[in-house]
Every structure is written in structure tokens, then in C-alpha cells.
Amino acid sequence: MKRDLNLVREILLRLEPLSATPDQPVPIDIGKPPLDIPDYTDEQIVYHIRIMEDGGLISYSSGITTPLGGAPSAGRSLPPSSV
């Protein structure tokens, strides 16, 4: 699957208001608010959440929690695309 930086941006914008921290993760469901993103499949969203975790932008545990504390400085770049 090809990396879509517009989707990465949209995911981050939707997760930022959740005010989650590593100590208090917020449960999320793919396909439901805030991750009900028009024109993207659940598979695409999950893939991008995984590459965002690999890049250090978010923490993702058991597929349902996202402890965000703001993206770390080192997390501003994503892993290379595997295209």
C-alpha cells in the first residue's frame, strides 16, 4: 500500500484534540469518530496508523488506544515508503 501523507495529516488532526497521554490513552475505533475519514477504507487508516507508530508520531496499543502527548520532535518524519 502506498503511503498517503494527506491521510497521515488528517489522522493527526483528528487525534490531536483527544488530549491522550501515555498514562491515559484514549480508546478509538477505526471507522467511527474521530477516525471516520471519508474516501479512505478502514484498511488504509489502519496501515497509516501503523506507519505513524513506526515513525514515532503516535503510540498505538492493541489496535484500540492511542496515547498521544503531541508528536515528538523525532517523530516528525515518517519511515521510508515501501513502494
Image (spheres, rainbow, N blue to C red):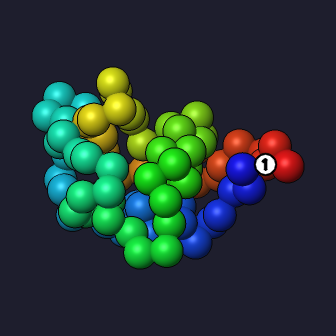
The residue lying at 48 percent from left, 45 percent from top is 46
Relative side of 50 to 25, left or right = right
The residue lying at 50 percent from left, 66 percent from top is 40
Residue 76 visible in image? yes
The quarter holding residue 4 reads: bottom right
24 or 36: nearer the viewer: 36
Residue 64, above or below 20: above
x and y, in percent, of residue 73 in the image: 52, 49
Q: Classify 10 Å Cα crowding around label 1: few (below 14), some (14-19), many (20 and above).
A: few
Residue at disc 1, secondary structure: loop
Question: Which residue lies under the disc numbered 1?
Answer: 81
Residue type at tag 1: Ser
x and y, in percent, of residue 22 in the image: 25, 32
Label total for image? 1
The residue lying at 26 percent from left, 36 percent from top is 65
Relative side of 78 to 58, left or right = right
Residue 21 visible in image? no
Extreme-top residue of the structure: 62
x and y, in percent, of residue 12 in the image: 41, 61
Extreme-left residue of the structure: 24
x and y, in percent, of residue 45 in the image: 48, 53
7 or 74: nearer the viewer: 7
Relative side of 72 to 82, left or right = left
